[in-house]
Image (cartoon, rainbow, N blue to C red):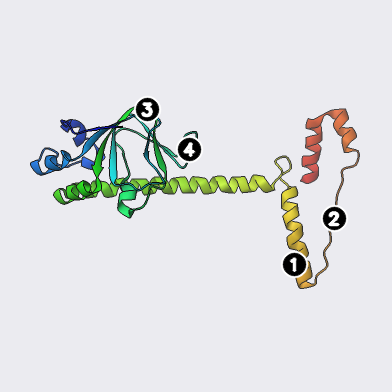
């Protein structure tokens, strides 16, 4: 990672979400901007880690970043594109980032120290408004991820307890159900009965007509 303070692309900065409707050419703003750094990042570099605190808000100017929970080979939760920010949540709550951010390809970011960020907020209330918008979008996206995760969890739980062919409960569910029913029977002093069914000559039918026909028999019996 290389850091430098250099001339600013005013047009590019004015288009960033954080600086929208901000007078980026004002003397007060430029004085603070000159205290920030443009950093060149190399591929696979970790810019934010769950194991270390963070004091910077990073704006991606060029390249791509991946937000991941753990290691390099993990499928990313999200891809950060140019113009987007990272690090604002850990600055607000003063905690280590909840996910790591890895550099996908050689990239350039504008690094704003948290003290400088708060001074920018004092100079321009539009920055505070934009920062709130960015955080609201982050929370909204996080809620969508949580909702998708819960839906996937429900699907996994369903498939873990149901037979895919017949839609009947499977052996794992039966093992759990047996324990529950036996305990309830003993607790409430109620009788407990078990009925077992078998399909006569099923193997012979399977051998004669094939597995697809045998599957249809199982589906029909299950229904």
Q: Residue at x 78, y 36 (%)?
A: 216
Spatial distance from mark 1 to mark 4, Cα to Cα?
45 Å
Q: Does label 4 or label 3 sit earlier along the sequence?
A: 4
Residue 119 higher or lower than 2, as above or below: below
Whether label 1 touches label 3, CB < 8 Å: no
Residue 202 higher or lower than 192, as above or below: above
Whether label 3 touches label 2, CB < 8 Å: no
Which one is in front in this view, the residue at disc 3 or the one at disc 2?
3
Q: Residue 176 sits in which quadrant?
A: bottom right
Whether label 1 touches label 2, CB < 8 Å: no
Q: In the rendered image, which residue does mark 2 sit on?
A: 195
> Where is the N terminus found, in terms of image quarters?
top left
Spatial distance from mark 1 to mark 2, Cα to Cα?
18 Å
Q: Residue 48 sits in which quadrant?
A: top left
Which one is in front in this view, the residue at disc 1 or the one at disc 3?
3
Q: State the SS at label 2.
A: loop
Q: State the SS at label 3.
A: loop
Describe residue 94's horizontal placement relative to residue 76 as left or right: left
Query: Which one is nearer the viewer's eye here, 185 or 196?
Result: 185
Q: In the rendered image, which residue does mark 3 sit on?
A: 105
Spatial distance from mark 2 to mark 4, Cα to Cα?
50 Å
Image location (x, y in percent) of residue 47 = 35, 38
Q: Does label 1 or label 4 sit earlier along the sequence?
A: 4
Describe residue 162's horizontal placement relative to residue 37 as left or right: right
Image location (x, y in percent) of residue 219 = 77, 41
Q: State the SS at label 1.
A: helix
Residue 184: mark in rendering: 1
Q: Does label 1 or label 3 sit earlier along the sequence?
A: 3
Q: In the rendered image, which residue does mark 4 sit on?
A: 71
Image location (x, y in percent) of residue 91 = 30, 50
Image location (x, y in percent) of residue 5 = 19, 34
Spatial distance from mark 3 to mark 2, Cα to Cα?
62 Å
């Amino acid at each position: 990672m290389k850091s430098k303070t250099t001339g600013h692309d005013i047009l590019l900065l004015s288009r960033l979400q954080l600086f929208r409707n901000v007078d980026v050419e004002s003397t007060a703003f430029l004085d603070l901007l000159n205290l920030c750094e443009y950093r060149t990042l190399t591929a696979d570099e970790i810019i934010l880690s769950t194991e270390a605190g963070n004091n910077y808000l990073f704006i991606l100017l060029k390249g791509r970043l991946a937000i991941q929970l753990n290691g390099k080979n993990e499928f990313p939760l999200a891809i950060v594109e140019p113009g987007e920010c990272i690090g604002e949540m850990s600055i607000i709550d003063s905690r280590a980032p909840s996910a790591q951010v890895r550099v996908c390809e050689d990239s350039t970011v504008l690094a704003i120290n948290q003290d400088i960020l708060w001074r920018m907020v004092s100079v321009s209330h539009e920055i505070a408004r934009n920062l709130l918008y960015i955080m609201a979008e982050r929370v909204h996206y996080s809620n969508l991820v949580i909702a998708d995760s819960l839906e996937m969890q429900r699907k996994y739980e369903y498939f873990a307890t149901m037979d895919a062919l017949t839609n009947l409960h499977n052996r794992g569910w039966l093992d759990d159900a047996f324990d529950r029913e036996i305990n309830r029977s003993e607790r409430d002093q109620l009788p407990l009965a078990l009925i077992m069914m078998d399909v006569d000559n099923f193997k012979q039918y399977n051998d004669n007509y094939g597995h697809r026909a045998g599957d249809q028999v199982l589906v029909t019996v299950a229904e």
